[in-house]
Image (spheres, rainbow, N blue to C red):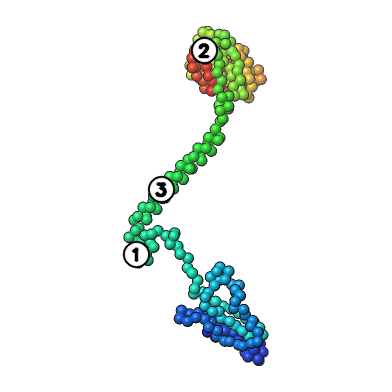
Amino acid sequence: MMSLAARSGAFSPYMQATAFTVAGPLKALVPGVVVKGEKILLDPKKKFLCRETLTGQSPKTGPAVTVSINGCAGVRFAHTDVKVPDFSDYRRPEVQDPNKSSQDSSESRRTFSYLVTGASTVMAVYAAKTVVTQFVSSMSASADVLALSKIEIKLGDIPEGKNMTFKWRGKPLFVRHRTEKEIATEEAVNMAELRDPQHDRDRVQNPSWVIVLGVCTHLGCVPIANAGDWGGYYCPCHGSHYDASGRIRKGPAPLNLEVPYYEFPDEETVIVG
């Protein structure tokens, strides 16, 4: 294919001729126009700076050369000899034969795909479960914190009719050893008279022992044991009176003293927490 590049001027068609040749499947490239000159402007031994030479895929057929009187030159290559990569190493043996239908091996390939997908899913679920377990475990209390969350009290050190105060989780803990008279009195209380109705047997596991938190339910003050109008606990801050079961009987406190979780491993020991 020949093309003529014209510039302004009357003699421009005679001053420059440009030839572009594209290789075909039947014959190699040949120069379309050759203009002889005293000096060769194009060195065929020097590699051309183009995409093909940079990637090592330069064509083997000859280039098309443009030569003109004013010294301009251009080169164009055909891309019919670029090597296509071979992906045989990445393809399954069942589908490498172009003359064989891939439907014949579809069942085996589908089974393999399902197997790989199922195994990957099981591994992903197990990994996710491990990560979640580790994350939740990291937020749980450590061994030293759990040790401080419980307190063991020797009941033999508390005489009958007395109250002892212990520190548990940063709060005062009242442990009261009640007398038979106090037990009978608290069990006979009329529930209709209570602001926060609760029977005595619902607040104790052993009638002889009352275990409550020493925090007033009004504003969080610490009541005084063995005081008040009912001989239980008395908060002097605002005048809340509690009986020997820790139930509010008079004053601004709205609720009874809190009963923590505790258990008796034996008759002489109680573990709170």
**222 to the left or right of 266:** right
Amino acid at dot 3: Gly
Distance of label 3 from label 2 (alpha carbons): 59 Å
Specify whether residue 88 is in view: yes
Q: Nearer the viewer, mark 1 or mark 3?
A: 1
Q: Position of residue 65 (x, y in %)?
A: 58, 82
The image quarter in which residue 68 lies: bottom right
Residue for badge 3: 118
Near-viewer residue (92 or 116): 92
| Gap in angstroms between the C-alphas marked 1 and 3 | 29 Å
Percent coordinates x, y for residue 122 in the rendering? 43, 45
**Residue occupying image coordinates x 54% and y 32%:** 140
Which residue occupies 38% across, 59% down? 93
Which callout, 3 or 2, points at the residue further toward the start of the chain? Answer: 3
Label 1 vs label 2, nearer the camera: 1
Q: Nearer the viewer, residue 199 or 125?
A: 125
Residue 92's tag is: none
The residue indicated by pointer 1 is 100
- Residue drawn where x is 36% and y is 60% of the image: 94
The mark nearer the N terminus, 1 or 2, is 1
Which residue is depicted at the point 56% across and 68% down?
55
What crowding class fits label 2: few (fewer than 14 Cα within 10 Å), some (14-19), or many (20 or more)? few
Compared to residue 238, the image places residue 8 above or below, namely below
Tell me the amino acid under the disc marked 2: Glu
**What amino acid is found at the position of numbered circle 1 in the picture?**
Lys
Q: Is residue 204 left or right of residue 9?
A: left
Q: Residues within 10 Å of mark 3 (few under 14, many from 20)?
A: few
Reading the image, the residue beneath label 2 is 268
Sequence order check, earlier mark of 1 and 3 = 1
